[in-house]
Amino acid sequence: MFVEEQNQNNVQYYQKMLKAAGSLSNLFSESPQPYLGYRLVENLFCKSFEAENLSRFDCSVDASKESVGIGVKTFLYKNGKSFEKIAEFNKELDLFRGLNPDNMVKKISELRNQRLEFTRRNYRISDILYHCVVRNTGKIIVYETPMHSINLNRIRSIDSKRNTLSFKDNLNEYRFNIAKSTLFRQFIAQDFALDFNVEIISDPFKALEKLLDISAEELVFVPIREQPHVFLPLYSGRSGTKNVPEKSGLNQWNASGRPRDPNEIYIPIPAWIHRDYPDFFPERDTTFNLRLPNGDILNAKVCQDNAKALMTNPNAAMGRWLLRDVLGLQEREPLTYEMLEAIGLDTVVIYKENEENFEIEFSRIGTYESFKGELTATEND
């Protein structure tokens, strides 16, 4: 299926964003099941997996990627089985109005299959499936199932009750609401691709108030991922106490000598990092992509004597992000360790995807020391 073949970083981002959106459910509902608008899920799916968004087009899928068409659906778990809408035929009403149940089922099935074939041809799709985001009490489940054509030769169990026609083929059960010209298919929750809990925020309005006043104090430390990574300190401990050097590191702009850009900084890389993780960073002065928490990507490299500095090109790009956007400092305002301590962070974690792509996140106070201590303990065992 689709999700199982995607990059795990993209899958983790998708899950994290679904969880975050679900946590705000009390903005819309008092139900214990997380609320997710279907359009939000469609857009998030496309953003997370870099898929083409087809939800605004008149076709049978909401997204496509690499010849795979995906119908993105979100609905309640109920008892694990539910009938969900898969197509409407209002414009084709004249083609089946007045037909007896058997002929109406056949015509609706033919129309459904024609739409699927058109979608395949028009968007050059070979495989087609449903991506189901299912909301259960306190959790979200994701599973995928093929988007089958209706087997015209195996239609059976046609049953007409009031305004509804029920029928089956050899793979699925269907219902057709005659009054609304809407076809439903039964979905059965099984073989989960994702299954995670969602904590619904009791007062989501407070969370929104914080978003309106974003500052360094609201930094969120995400859990450390199972991916190659190292921790780097935003301070120096050479004097026996933690401090941000006055004229180097995150205050490099304040160094004497040549005129410097007020955003010029670097993140120090302790020598033992290169010794114990010799293959983590590229060779000195070899450029690579560094993805920021906000999604921006900077051109970065390891440089200076003994490869002691993580810098960007242009160098001021990192300073504008870290000193101005994140820490909120004025130009030429020295950063002190006390400022970092007041915020609750003094470390960054660098993730490595490959030799050309890295990512940076913040980590809480003491993380670097714990990282170094754990390694020292392992070496002494």
Image: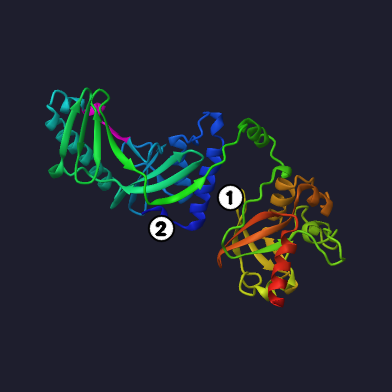
Q: Which residue is drawn at 38% across and 36% down?
A: 56
Q: Can residue 313 be seen in this view?
A: no
Mark closest to the chain's N terminus, 1 or 2: 2
**Vertical comparison of 20 with 279: above or below:** above
Q: Label 1 neighbourhood size at 10 Å, few (<14), some (14-19), many (20+)?
A: few
| x, y percent for residue 48 | 48, 48
What residue appears at the point 33 percent right and 48 percent down from the top-left corner?
145
Against 12, residue 240 (above or below) is below
Q: Is residue 223 above or below residue 287?
A: above
Can you give x and y, in whole percent of width and height, for residue 332 in the image? 82, 50
Q: Callout 2: helix, strand or loop?
A: helix
Please state the total of marks drawn on the protein image: 2
Q: Which mark is residue 165?
A: none
**Which residue, given by chain and number where applicable, does mark 2 sit on?**
5
Residue 151 sits inside the magenta stretch: no
User: Residue type at mark 2?
Assistant: Glu
Q: Quadrant of residue 1?
A: bottom left
Q: Is residue 165 at least partly visible in the picture?
A: yes
For residue 218, side relative to residue 129 (left or right): right
Image quarter (top left, top right, bottom left or bottom right) of the C terminus: bottom right
Observer-nearest of 74 and 308: 74
In the image: residue 106, left or right of residue 328 = left
Q: What x and y, as percent, mark residue 199?
A: 57, 40
The one of 143 and 106 positioned closer to us in this rendering: 143
Q: Mark 1 points at which residue?
A: 295
Specify the amino acid type for callout 1. Gly
Which residue range is magenta in the image? 84-92
